[in-house]
């Protein structure tokens, strides 16, 4: 089994991110994650209810596991997706062109 030695990976300082990409706003990424958590929770609850219905059809027994864990898992997945998408967009945006020179 291969393992990843994290000691060989370079650390990226936040000050370096500011010089390379024009700035990274962690607060903005967290806000994007928070905004995506609500829709993720709703999707998780819907999928959980669907799981419970399918379980009842397949086994004839009631289940509440989908409704119980679907919402929190969906919220976590939504938050992670929103945070990751915003982070990716911030780091991949093109650098601003240089300011025009005046004569």
Image (tube, helix red, strand yellow):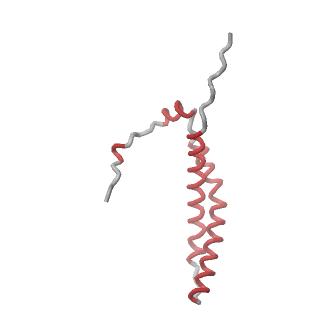
Given the current orientation, which residue lies at the most extreme right position? 103
The quarter of the image holding the N terminus is bottom left
Q: Residue at x 58, y 79 (%)?
A: 64
Q: Position of residue 10 (x, y in %)?
A: 39, 40
Q: Position of residue 56 (x, y in %)?
A: 60, 85
Q: Residue at x 32, y 56 (%)?
A: 2
Q: Residue at x 44, y 38 (%)?
A: 12
Residue 76, above or below 46: above
Given the current orientation, which residue lies at the most extreme bottom position? 60
Given the current orientation, which residue lies at the most extreme left position? 1
Q: Is residue 21 left or right of residue 99?
A: left
In which image quadrant can residue 68 be found?
bottom right
Q: Position of residue 61 (x, y in %)?
A: 57, 88
Q: Position of residue 8 (x, y in %)?
A: 34, 43
**Numbered-mark total:** 0
The quarter of the image holding the C terminus is top right
């Amino acid at each position: 089994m291969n393992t990843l030695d994290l000691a060989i990976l370079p650390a990226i300082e936040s000050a370096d991110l500011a010089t390379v990409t024009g700035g990274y706003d962690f607060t903005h990424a967290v806000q994007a994650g928070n905004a995506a958590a609500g829709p993720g929770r709703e999707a998780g609850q819907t999928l959980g209810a669907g799981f419970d219905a399918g379980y009842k059809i397949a086994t004839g027994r009631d289940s509440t596991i989908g409704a119980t864990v679907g919402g929190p898992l969906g919220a976590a997945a939504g938050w992670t997706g929103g945070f990751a998408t915003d982070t990716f967009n911030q780091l991949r945006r093109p650098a601003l062109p240089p300011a025009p020179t005046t004569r």
